[in-house]
């Protein structure tokens, strides 16, 4: 009869191996996500001018749409109230007359084609119900100057407009503000964020962090900041003297600071991509994912990053003001300095 101890040792050893394999399997993060393919670069480009009558001019600021056949664009500055809102049906741009003032219509945002909002540099908010544009309300307190720059929302119940009170000579001093839409009362309410002396300039929701991120600039001090907004609490994360904006890809926030792109993880920001070697890089960024996004470079052109390098796909000396991206199309609204007209650069992926 063999020694029981001799039999027990190999059995224990094999059991330990099996247990280790099972344990390692249970610690797996789940199915590996498919590798992101580099974004295509075979675009055809069309250039269109936003035509207005002789003597009139526009300067686009906000753009939003549900598809390449349904795009709305606001004019932040224009010569008259008539040329402050435009619609693109996939073929041509049409001026939309609303019958009320849209002075400095800077921001536009929607949840669907029947629920679209516009905010202005004079504190007004308007809404489109699928049939008509209607003035919603003026939220400028008496004796104040309130500029609303845009919207951001994860849902209609978590929907915000951002901007600032502008004070002092030449509006050189400011206090940041947030308005939140109250579904129950059908009204916008001021959010208490304390005395934050800055101007909120861009905002997006990060579905992974479950919070909003906001960027700002201080017209008096010259510095720009990144804030985290969560549970009605605002936290200052970053300060810079370089151009700073936040944008969104795949429901995650990315931050442009000068020629660098930052990401947020583990309660801190880190440099994800550094494009310091690029000439003149200072424009907006928009994309579909981390291997398929555009860089718009003032005075150089439209670049594209595919996970390996950044390549100029369309050369132009125009300056960029607004932009929007879809699955197979991208539009950049541009202008030439000192010439008051909007030029749309429209890129379409080739069909095979």
Image: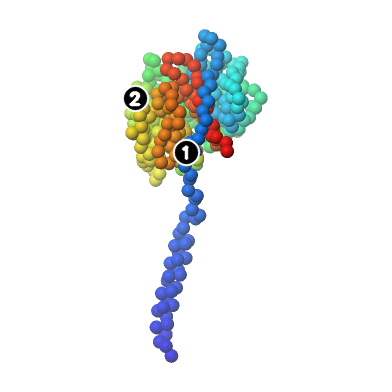
Disc 2: CA contacts within 10 A as few (<14), some (14-19) or many (>=20): few
Q: Quadrant of the N terminus?
A: bottom left
Task: Nearest to the eye among marks 1 and 2: give it.
Answer: 1
Residue 115: percent from left, percent from top: 61, 30
Residue 89: percent from left, percent from top: 61, 26
Q: Residue at x 49, y 16 (%)?
A: 341
Location of residue 175 with respect to 351 vertically, above or below? above
Location of residue 273 with respect to 331 vertically, above or below? below
Q: Is residue 232 visible?
A: no
Q: Is residue 64 visible?
A: yes
Disc 1: CA contacts within 10 A as few (<14), some (14-19) or many (>=20): some
193 or 291, which is in the foreground? 291
Q: Residue at x 60, y 25 (%)?
A: 91
In this figure, which residue is indicated by the disc labeled 1? 292
Q: Residue at x 45, y 70 (%)?
A: 18
Q: Secondary structure at mark 1?
A: strand
Residue 153: percent from left, percent from top: 52, 34
Q: Quadrant of the C terminus?
A: top right
Q: Quadrant of residue 269?
A: top left
CA separation, marks 1 and 2? 32 Å
Q: Earlier in the sequence, mark 1 or mark 2?
A: 2
Furthest-right residue in this view: 131
């Amino acid at each position: 009869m063999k020694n029981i101890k001799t039999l027990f040792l190999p059995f224990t050893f094999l059991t330990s191996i099996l247990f280790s394999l099972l344990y390692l399997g249970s610690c797996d993060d789940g199915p590996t996500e498919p590798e992101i393919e580099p974004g295509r670069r075979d675009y055809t480009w069309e250039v269109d001018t936003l035509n207005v009558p002789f003597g009139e001019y526009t300067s686009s600021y906000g753009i939003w749409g549900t598809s390449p056949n349904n795009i709305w664009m606001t004019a932040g500055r224009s010569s008259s109230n008539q040329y402050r809102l435009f619609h693109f049906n996939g073929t041509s741009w049409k001026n939309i007359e609303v019958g009320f003032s849209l002075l400095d219509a800077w921001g536009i945002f929607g949840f669907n084609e029947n629920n679209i909002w516009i905010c202005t540099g004079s504190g007004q908010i308007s809404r489109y119900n699928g049939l008509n544009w209607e003035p919603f309300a003026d939220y400028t307190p008496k004796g104040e100057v309130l500029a609303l720059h845009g919207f951001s929302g994860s849902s209609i119940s978590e929907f915000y407009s951002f901007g600032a009170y502008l004070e002092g000579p030449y509006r050189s001093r400011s206090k940041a503000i947030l308005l939140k839409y109250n579904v129950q009362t059908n009204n916008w309410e001021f959010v208490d964020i304390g005395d934050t002396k800055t101007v909120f300039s861009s905002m997006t929701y990060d579905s992974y962090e479950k919070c909003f991120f906001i960027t700002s600039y201080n017209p008096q001090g010259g510095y720009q900041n990144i804030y985290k907004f969560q549970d009605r609490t605002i936290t200052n994360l970053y300060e810079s003297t370089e151009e700073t904006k936040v944008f969104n890809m795949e429901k995650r926030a990315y931050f442009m600071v000068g020629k660098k792109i930052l990401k947020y993880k583990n309660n801190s920001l880190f440099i994800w991509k550094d494009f310091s070697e690029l000439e003149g890089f200072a424009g907006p960024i928009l994309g579909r994912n981390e291997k398929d996004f555009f860089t718009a470079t003032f005075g150089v052109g439209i670049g594209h990053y595919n996970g390996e390098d950044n390549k100029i796909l369309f050369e132009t000396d125009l300056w960029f003001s607004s932009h929007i991206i879809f699955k197979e199309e991208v539009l950049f609204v541009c202008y030439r300095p000192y010439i008051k007209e909007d030029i749309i650069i429209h890129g379409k992926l080739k069909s095979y």
